[in-house]
Amino acid sequence: MQAVTLGPAGTYSHRAARAVADGVSFRESVTAIVEAVADGEAERGVVPIENSIEGSVSESLDALAESDVAVVREVVTPIRHGLLAQSEEFSVVASHSQALAQCRDYLEREYPDVDQEAVASTARGVERAREDPSVAGIGHPATAEPEGEGRTLRVLAEDIQDQSSNATRFLVVAPESERSDGGGKTSVVVYPGTNYPGLLLELLEAFADRDINLTRIESRPSGNRLGDYLFHVDFEAGLYEPRTEAALADVEELAANGWVKVLGSYDTQHVVE
Ligand SMILES: O=C(O)C(=O)C[C@]1(C(=O)O)C=C[C@@H](O)C=C1
């Protein structure tokens, strides 16, 4: 199985993708990854969806809501950041915005005068540090060694994330035709297309009445107008279960003026390294 994920080589997404695919190639954004799967260019895509410190990756949520793909697995992996540079003498830290945010307190405490630069991925920041002595990157410590040509960086500090138990959840996306009914979890996106007192309560009751545990609910702007939202809902039940069918029938009814996108059922895989 071939997968596309966020590049270049050495990103945390790459580490997650390696656990589910034999071959991995790269794109520059999560939107491009989801599009590659939707357009049939790739069999699988691996995108970060949520981090235990920084919360949701909104670009991934929006790409899932906008494209016709299925979710076939989730991968949860610990994120332990290192600070990598040619020497202690740097004036810029370059990394993915999520990684910079996960290390906010550390950077403010240890390097208050250093500028922060958001780049497309942690590996892209490490690449910048390899080329430029005034730049440090934040990334997996193993990326201090280049995969091919290039300078080996010093690992100036390890475990610099603001909470020791930092973890990111990735979703594995597949073509829509591979959507599965089997699995312990299911993801749906609901656009009610209406707004009245108690709407959200009714949405939640559809699951509560069937004793289905929600693991996440996240609202995102629909993009149509201010105050108009769609909801990403993840829950602990499979589409094959009658209680899920009953809950989703209620959800379809309350979204009669909008739409419900069922992304599919899947299981969780924990990847330690
Ligand atoms: O830049 C990377 O290494 C990525 O794979 C992206 C990403 C993210 O978007 O959250 C993945 C895991 C970490 O939380 C930090 C960055």
Image (cartoon, helix red, strand yellow):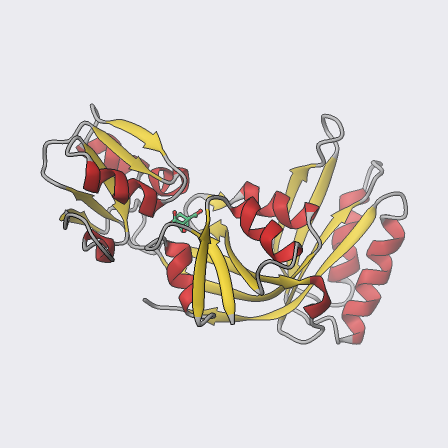
Describe residue 100's horizontal placement relative to residue 3 as left or right: left
Number of disc labels = 0
Q: How far across and down, in percent of the image, does residue 73 sit?
A: 56, 67
At x 86%, y 61%, the residue is 249
Q: How far across and how far down the image is residue 207, in percent?
A: 74, 61
In the figure, 192 relative to 12: above or below?
above
Q: Nearer the viewer, residue 127 or 97?
A: 127
Furthest residue in direction top, as rendered? 113
Residue ID at (41%, 46%): 53
Which of the two residues, 224 or 178, is positioned nearer the viewer here? 178
Residue ID at (71%, 62%): 176
Work out whether 140 lies above or below 2.
Answer: above
The reply, left or right, for residue 61 in relation to residue 170 is right
User: What is the x, y in percent for residue 60?
Assistant: 56, 47
Q: Nearer the viewer, residue 213 or 78?
A: 78
The quadrant of the rendering that contains the C terminus is bottom left
Q: Nearer the viewer, residue 12 or 7?
A: 7
Residue drawn at x 44%, y 53% is: 26
Image side of residue 252 versus residue 170, left or right: right
Q: Residue 126 lies in what quarter of the image?
A: top left
State the image coordinates of residue 2 (x, y, percent, origin top left).
50, 67
Is residue 259 found left or right of 101 in the rendered image? right
